Image (spheres, rainbow, N blue to C red):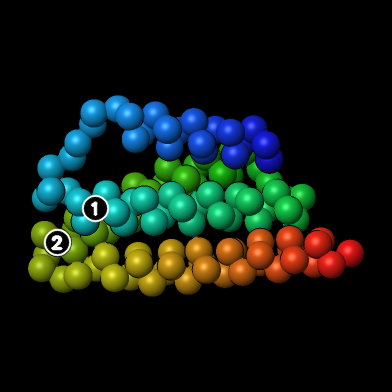
Amino acid sequence: MIVALVGIIVGLGIGFYLPVTFPAQYSLYLSISIIAAFDSIFGAVRANLENKFDTLIFTTGFFGNAFLAGMLAYIGDQLGVPLYYAAIVAFGVRLFENFAFIRRYFISKLRE
């Protein structure tokens, strides 16, 4: 768990200091992909707390969900249908559920 947190912090630090910019026209796809990636991260933290974490499942879910969400937004954009709402709702609900579980887990640990 500590290695994952250090990796996230190092990755965020590198991301903030590298001069990489994306065109504004891709911001929708990128934001949906980031939501999907956060969903995978929170799911991994939850799985680790439940002693069910699997690196292969996390890695494939992280990249697969981010790619699928970005592609869903792109296809919807091309068709003129806002399909990105489906990704926002699906990943948003899961993200808040996982966060609620993590929060309750740590609160129960603090009360013991």
- Quarter of the image where the N terminus is located: top right
Q: Amino acid at mark 1?
A: Tyr
- Residue at figure coordinates x 54%, y 33% from the top left: 7
How far across and how far down the image is residue 79, in percent? Answer: 11, 65
| Image-based side of 109 in relation to 101, left or right | right
Q: Secondary structure at mark 1?
A: helix
Q: Label 2 is placed on what type of residue?
A: Asp
Q: Quadrant of the C terminus?
A: bottom right
Q: Residue at x 84, y 67 (%)?
A: 111
* Residue 67 in sight from this viewpoint: yes
Q: Is residue 65 visible?
A: no
Contact between marks 1 and 2 (CB within 8 A): the answer is yes
- Residue 20 rendering spot, x and y as whole percentages: 23, 31
Residue 93: x %, y % from top left: 48, 71
Residue at 18%, 40% in the rendered image: 22
Along the line of sight, the residue nearer the viewer: 8 or 39:
8
Instruction: Give the label on residue 77, or none.
Output: 2
Q: Give residue 70's mark.
A: none
Distance CA(mark 1)–CA(mark 2): 9 Å
Q: In the image shown, does 83 or 15 lie closer to the viewer?
A: 15
* Disc ID at residue 29: 1
Tag 2, which secondary structure?
Answer: helix
Q: Is residue 33 above or below residue 54?
A: below
